[in-house]
Amino acid sequence: MNTNLEHYKIFYHVATEQSITGAARKLNISQPAVSQAVKQLEEGLGIELFTRKAKGVSLTGAGNLLYSYVSNGYETIMAGERQLAKMMNLETGEVRIGASDMTLQFYLLPFLERFHVLYPEIKVTVTNAPTPRTIEHLTQGRIDFGVVTGPLDADSHFDIIPVRKVQDIFVAGTKFRHLKDRMIDYKELEQLPIISLEGKTSTRTYVEAFLERKRVAVKPEFELATSDMIIQFAMRNLGVGCVVEDFAGKQISDGSLIKLKFEEEIPPRNMCLIIDKRSSMSVAATKLREILETDSKV
């Protein structure tokens, strides 16, 4: 039979309230509408579901049997609606972000702190990885969006939104203080011990491409996993390190590192949000994205 599902909803409330009037009040509809729906359900099923009493109604044996099934289904639907409402109101949910050490430390962390204060019930998962790996996670649907450093190859599948400028620099320890007060030609780097990030990170790729345009080829003596380690090696006078300036700001200020000066700085680049347009984003992730875009410094 093809029974109107709305009739089962009304049946559920009549049975729960044990009253036509009570169900009408609960559903905010008229008593005749409730009575008509019950009548049509009984006629459709070919059996009486309620016994009418002076004050209200009670379920028949058949009604009790049907109610045991309808109540489970209806209450499950209601529970689903409540959870959905909580998700829409950011009372529950999850955000999955991909970020490098740099983007997490110097951009994302304060936003995550604020987001947690505003929406404490939202679970935030951060997958820490360099830019190429973050893009891979995004493509595979493991994260909602990434916060990465450019430049990035154009891809019609991605939205790429600049949010903050970053500046690549070369730094050295006190052993190299003779370089502090003069302009250096990038060609001189070929004669210096260089410390750089290992592998095909966005930072290393960008700086090497810039040096190549200057016809400068450097062969790092130390290749390290993190920029923090580059700072530590440079402070111990093991070479000239290439890092984003944010990492070395404190050490440059206190004099434990010097910033090398060149007539032409390496062009600044951007931290960016990267979003796969082919994938849907959770409500919580959408809200965090809105916060990040609103407070963009680019």
Image (cartoon, rainbow, N blue to C red):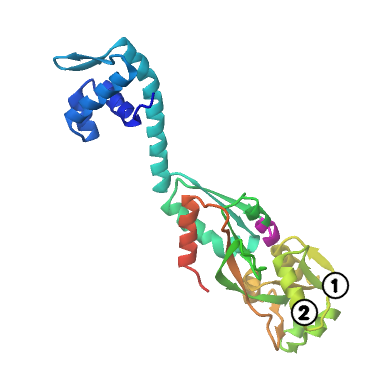
| Relative horizontal placement of residue 31, taking residue 84 as reference (left or right) | left
Mark number, residue 211: 2
Disc 1 marks which amino acid? Lys
Mark number, residue 219: 1
Mark number, residue 27: none
x and y percent of residue 182 in the render? Answer: 73, 89
Query: Which one is in front, 233 or 57?
Result: 57
The residue shown at (70%, 78%) is 258
**Which segment is the magenta one?**
129-135
Query: Which one is in front, 290 or 29?
Result: 29
- Counting residues from the N terminus, which is met first, the one under dot 1 or under dot 2? 2
Query: Which one is in front, 238 or 222?
Result: 222
| Relative horizontal placement of residue 142, taking residue 69 as reference (left or right) | right
Which element is circle 2 on?
helix
Which quarter of the figure is the N terminus placed in?
Answer: top left
The residue shown at (38%, 27%) is 2
The residue shown at (69%, 76%) is 169
